[in-house]
Image: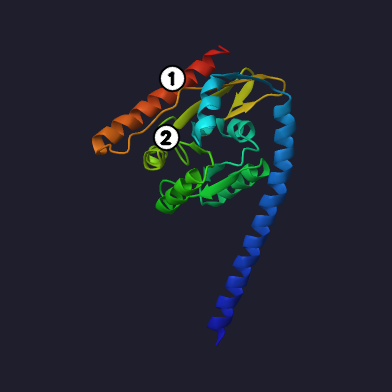
Amino acid sequence: MNEPRKKKKAIRRARNLTTRFRLAVYLLTGFAAIILWCWFKTLRLQVVGEEYDLAECDKGPVIYTTWHRSFLFGVYFLRWRGGFTMASPSEDGEWAAGLVRRFGNFTVRGSSSRKGGVALHRLIEKLKEGHSGSMVTDAPRGPARKSKPGVLLLAQRSGVPILPMQFAAKWCICLRSWDRTIVPLPFSRFVVKFSEPFRVASDLDEEAFERRLDELDQVLNRLTDEVDAYFK
């Protein structure tokens, strides 16, 4: 007799926890978005290679790609574009998704290890609807500066080009996290640099796919070294 009651109480407790968690995410990401907006408004922005971005966006959707270390830059720089960002289905991903929504974009939840196939299908649908999107290619847990295959699969199956982009700041804090997250200091200069579009053929075999993935890493790492060199 007590077992059904215990189960019902456990379900109610789980629902209450979920409601409280979502409320906390809603309130705290709103507060964080205000701080981030004011913080980044003090920065002096320089865009390099903007012609690649403008030219490709005139043709159709693109897949913006960067490393996890630049997540905060990407959220701010790509604000109010009505595009998507891939976010982990975990609780950590919920915080990222909340922040992305505060800046006028939306998320598709999934990762390389959980719900990846379903998420990939939804991302392809969004690209076909005309939405551009962004993917952090070494997320969710690294290793840093090493791409997961998801972004290449998305470009291959959708026919949409990848547009590599990287960020750096003159004055910043580099966190001791796995990705070495960059937090710019107020009133710093920061640079975003685009590379030429990276296209993926639809008929690659497994070996050619791996080579192309390595080539994407080379492009992103070269771009990272170039933006870092602006302030060395």
Give the residue pinned by disc 1.
Answer: 222
Tag 1: amino acid: Arg
Q: Which mark is residue 143?
A: 2
Residue at x-position 70% and y-position 23%: 43
Q: Quadrant of the N terminus?
A: bottom right
Q: Residues within 10 Å of mark 2 (few under 14, many from 20)?
A: few
Q: Quick check: marks 1 and 2 in contact, CB under 8 Å?
A: no
Tag 2: amino acid: Pro
* SS class, disc 1: helix
* Nearer to us: label 1 or label 2: 1
Q: CA distance from mark 1 to mark 2?
A: 17 Å
* SS class, disc 2: loop
Percent coordinates x, y for residue 71 in the rendering: 56, 34
Q: Residue furthest front?
A: 59
Whichever of callouts 1 and 2 sits on the residue coming sooner in the sequence is 2
Residue at x-position 71% and y-position 24%: 186
Classify residue 118 by image quadrant: bottom left
Residue at x-position 50% and y-position 29%: 56
